[in-house]
Image (tube, helix red, strand yellow):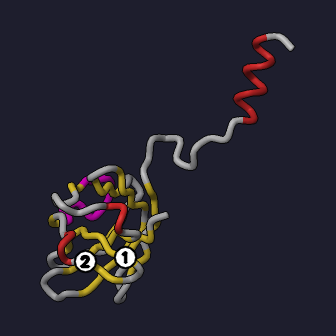
Amino acid sequence: MDRRSFLVAAIATTAMPAFAGGHGRLGTFTGVNNHVVTGTAEIAGNQVNLLDDFTFDGAPDPKIALGKDGDYDPATLMGKLENYNGASSFTIPDGINPDDYNEVWVWCERFSVGLGVAPIG
């Protein structure tokens, strides 16, 4: 086997990481409490990223936060959701370990109600 054939075979059989594009842990939003939230959330390092496909139907005082197993954690609030469509990024508060969480939430702080949740893989 020549070098080129070896390299082609090695590349073809090498397992690629699940998120070869450099993404962190990803999840897909589902709306809750009669809201429509769709698209992809990513936890990457100390950032939560809403990707280009993100859409939200709107509500007063929406913020981004983390949660675990269906429970939103108010200590993780990251700031107001300004863009209801498309990509945006939020910094996880100091002292919060993102590995402790498996959900990204769109949360209405004014009415203390979830608007959307993305379980993170």
Image coordinates of residue 33 in percent, x first then y, are 34, 89
User: Mark 2: which secondary structure?
Assistant: loop
Image coordinates of residue 102 in percent, x first then y, are 40, 69
Identified at 52% across, 47% down, the residue is 19
Circle nearer the N terminus (2, 1): 1
95 vs 19: above or below: below
Find out whether the residues at labels 2 and 1 contact each other: C-beta distance under 8 Å. Answer: yes
Q: Residues within 10 Å of mark 1 (few under 14, many from 20)?
A: some
Q: Quadrant of residue 37?
A: bottom left
Magenta extent:
81-89
What whole-number distance in Å separates the C-alpha atoms at marks 2 and 1? 8 Å
Within the magenta stretch, is there residue 74? Answer: no
Q: Which mark is residue 68?
A: 1
Q: Quadrant of residue 77?
A: bottom left
Seen from the viewer's position, the closer of residues 118 and 16 is 16
Q: Quadrant of residue 105?
A: bottom left
Image coordinates of residue 67 in percent, x first then y, are 32, 75
Seen from the viewer's position, the closer of residues 4 and 113 is 4
Locate the N terminus by quadrant.
top right
Q: Amino acid at mark 1?
A: Lys
Q: Is residue 21 left or right of residue 48?
A: right
